[in-house]
Amino acid sequence: MADLMTQTTPPPPVGFVRGCHMVAPEHALGNINKRRLKVTRFSDADDLQQDFVTPVTYKDARIELEPGDDDPLAQMSPELEAQLRCSKSDEWSYEEELRTFVPLSEAIKEGPLHFWPFEPRIRLVQVILGHRCELDLSDVRSAVVRCAAAATVTECFQRVVDLANVTSVDPP
């Protein structure tokens, strides 16, 4: 058997992009076992008319709403709503983030939370346990097998660097 710590996930098929969904350890196994991802809500709008995957636009200035309205979101134009959904500070541009929007009316609702099931467009392909994650690696691997996902499961380790011995740093 190959060394599981050196497993890599192959690139996605043509027409697909790899996305990351960071989840706290206390929710990770539940999401894998229930074959789903939690939906982060911007609003309760169900009429999203965007492509399935939308690139984020990075801006050097924050988008400002007009003060004085009791509920500025109720008066928001579709253009402004789209800008707010897909904009971040240019300090985050290195992420090259893409966002996926799904209609809440089609999501699985549990109390105030919404979830989207794994499906042909959203697949579980890799699970990375962060260096502070206390979940047992074999428990997560077992959950992935039960989920019938062809996903790799690996651990991430924190590298400690002694900065006192660094003499120079080349500019980017």
Image: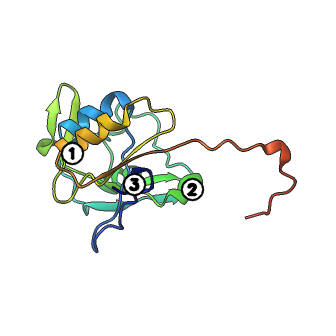
- SS of the residue at dot 3? loop
Question: Colour mode?
Answer: rainbow
**What kind of element bears circle 1?**
helix
- Badge 1 or badge 3: first in the primary sequence: 3
Amino acid on which the number 3 mark rests in the picture = Cys
Mark 3 — residue?
86
Amino acid type shown at disc 2: Asp
With respect to residue 134, does 23 lie above or below?
A: below
Q: Which residue is mark 2?
A: 90
Tell me the residue that label 1 is attached to: 145
Kindly tell me whether residue 161 is visible in this rendering: yes
Task: Please name the residue shown 84% across and 47% down the image.
Answer: 165
Amino acid type shown at disc 1: Val
Distance CA(mark 1)–CA(mark 3): 34 Å
Q: Position of residue 18 (x, y in %)?
A: 35, 60
Identify the residue at the far right of this view: 167
Among the 4 quarters of the image, the one containing residue 146: top left
Badge 3 crowding class, 10 Å Cα cut-off, few under 14, some 14 to 19, many 20 or more, is: some
- Image point 63% across, 44% down: which residue? 159
Mark 2 and mark 3: span between their CA atoms?
A: 12 Å
Q: Is residue 111 left or right of residue 165?
A: left
Q: Residues within 10 Å of mark 2 (few under 14, many from 20)?
A: some
Q: Quadrant of the C terminus?
A: bottom right
> Going by the picture, which residue comes out furthest to the bottom?
14
Q: Counting residues from the N terminus, which is met first, the one under dot 2 or under dot 1?
A: 2
> Are circles 2 and 1 on residues that touch, CB within 8 Å?
no
The 10 Å Cα crowd at callout 1, few under 14, some 14 to 19, many 20 or more, is some
Q: Nearer the viewer, mark 1 or mark 3?
A: 1
Q: Residue at x 28, y 34 (%)?
A: 29
Query: In which image quadrant can residue 11 be found?
Result: bottom left
